Image: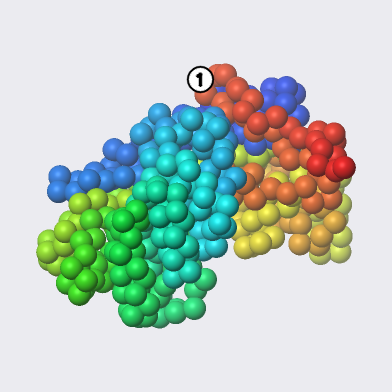
């Protein structure tokens, strides 16, 4: 990685971005997001099946991002009334929206029906019953997928094909009667149309075997349901979970490779099981935005304790809770000393009042000083979208940089914003 890359994003220098917008600052390389979206669209294709790529907006969303998703011809996953509201505000076509979640409220189900959302991904029996009732009452039609738990669980380097019947999401595939009863209820509705099954087996997955195992399981299950209920299963959604590169420990499967692998496996399973499958869907979130995003911080104080050097920055767990929440690992560089030798091993920590507010353990850094700019890479997914106002820290600004131009897409929160909701 050359100095050029370290110093600038989307052709805009990080120093200039810090001067204009302040820190902490979320910076997205817009062209990188566009490349990822286009790449999924281009490679997740089949001669035999229709394909659809839905961006999982919980990874990061705002109007500017939704415009890119729309322009790339992708669909959208939302998981709450709030995300749906923002999608509508951005003019995202409602028929291309999938609404997920294990506990959609009556108000959310109502919003779904009133706004013409394309597909609801059902989670459980009570939800199915309520949706059937509400759709009849409102005389509104809706397509549904049913989330099933295939008993395949994957996380990063490992996957397990052990039955975990107790996940909070979906209905476990081994509980066939519950699934059959739910589908019969849906079949009896004039307004709710069953389209197929959905599964999502984890996140930051590097092992393609996990996806292949998921596809086999879904295909065989679909076949058995088609036979038993005389109910076609035209769609299968494989969920998301494709990995991103955070550190050298990570080896994500290239987009073109994973896409063609999934498509081939689906084609083969459809043929082998003589399925009435028409369309396959994937839902990448992290893999679209993670690597495109970086967070720029200003270094404050540094201190050397008995066994540990600390470098403190002007953000932390309030803008990126992933290290504290999942021991997520990151890389960083000091923009203002990009060419200096890395002589210091230090823990990069935030300013929040929590001992766990650590961003990077044992980072290799040049000898830093207060005022230096530290750029943390791959913060584009589940960073801003999980940000809080803990310690009443205002949330950072977000800029999109491309072709030497920076565009402010979310302004920095102010102290006034923090009082905004108080009466
Ligand atoms: C979170 C989520 C995704 C996206 O997962 P990534 O790991 O970000 O790709 C896709 N589908 C569903 C149902 C999800 O909950």
Give the camera-side residue of 108 and 344: 108
Q: Residue at x 85, y 34 (%)?
A: 416
Is residue 283 among what the camera can see?
Answer: no
Q: Quadrant of residue 305?
A: bottom right
- Please provide percent x and percent y for residue 53: 35, 44
Residue drawn at point x = 23 percent, y = 56 percent: 234
Q: Is residue 9 above or below residue 53?
A: above
Q: Position of residue 6 (x, y in %)?
A: 59, 34
Along the viewing direction, whichever of 78 and 363 lies nearer the viewer: 78
> Local crowd at mark 1 within 10 Å, few (<14), some, or many (≥20)?
few
Q: Which of 4/13 is in front?
A: 13
Q: Residue 356 at x, y = what percent?
A: 76, 62
Which residue is at 57% across, 48% downward? 81
Residue 4 horizontal/vertical position (percent) = 56, 28
The image quarter containing residue 232 is bottom left
Q: Which residue is mark 1?
A: 403
Point 31% across, 45% down: residue? 52
- In the visual, does 207 lie left or right of 217? right
Quadrant housing the C terminus: top right
Q: Quadrant of residue 400?
A: top right
Judge left or right: residue 342 versus residue 52.
Answer: right
Along the horizontal axis of the image, is 361 left or right of 209? right
Q: Is residue 365 left or right of residue 5?
A: right
Residue 125 visible in the shown view:
yes
Asked which secondary structure carries label 1, the reply is: loop
């Amino acid at each position: 990685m050359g100095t050029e890359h370290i110093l600038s994003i989307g052709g805009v220098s990080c120093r200039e971005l810090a001067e204009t917008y302040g820190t902490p600052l979320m910076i997205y390389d817009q062209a990188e997001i566009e490349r990822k979206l286009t790449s999924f669209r281009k490679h997740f294709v089949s001669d035999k099946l229709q394909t659809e790529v839905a961006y999982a907006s919980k990874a990061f969303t705002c109007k500017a991002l939704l415009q890119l998703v729309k322009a790339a011809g992708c669909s959208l996953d939302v998981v709450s009334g709030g995300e749906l509201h923002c999608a509508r505000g951005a003019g995202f076509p409602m028929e291309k929206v999938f609404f997920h979640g294990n506990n959609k409220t009556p108000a959310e189900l109502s919003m779904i029906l009133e706004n013409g959302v394309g597909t609801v991904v059902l989670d459980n029996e009570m939800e199915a019953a309520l949706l059937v009732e509400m759709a009849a009452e409102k005389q509104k039609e809706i397509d549904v997928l049913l989330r099933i738990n295939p008993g395949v669980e994957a996380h990063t380097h490992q996957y397990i094909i052990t039955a975990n019947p107790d996940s909070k999401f979906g209905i476990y595939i081994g509980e066939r009667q519950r699934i059959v009863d739910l589908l019969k209820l849906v079949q009896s509705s004039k307004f709710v149309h069953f389209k197929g099954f959905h599964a999502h087996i984890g996140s930051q997955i590097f092992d393609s075997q996990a996806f292949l195992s998921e596809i086999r399981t879904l295909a065989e299950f679909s076949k058995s349901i088609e036979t038993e209920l005389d109910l076609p299963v035209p769609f299968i959604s494989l969920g998301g979970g494709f990995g991103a590169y955070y550190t050298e420990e990570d080896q994500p499967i290239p987009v073109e490779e994973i896409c063609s692998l999934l498509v081939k496996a689906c084609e083969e399973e459809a043929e082998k099981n003589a399925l009435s499958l028409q369309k396959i869907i994937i839902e990448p979130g992290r893999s679209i935005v993670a690597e495109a995003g970086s967070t720029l911080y200003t270094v404050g104080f540094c201190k050397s304790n008995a066994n540990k050097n600390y470098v403190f920055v002007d953000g932390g767990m309030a803008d990126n809770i992933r290290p504290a929440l999942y021991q997520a690992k990151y890389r960083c560089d000091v923009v203002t000393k990009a060419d200096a030798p890395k002589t210091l091993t230090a823990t990069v920590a935030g300013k929040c009042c929590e001992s766990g507010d650590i961003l990077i353990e044992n980072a290799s850094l040049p000898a830093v000083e207060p005022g230096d700019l530290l750029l943390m890479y791959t913060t584009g997914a589940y960073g801003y979208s999980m940000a809080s106002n803990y310690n009443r820290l205002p949330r950072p600004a977000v800029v999109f940089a491309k072709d030497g131009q920076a565009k402010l897409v979310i302004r920095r929160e102010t102290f006034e914003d923090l009082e905004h909701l108080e009466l």
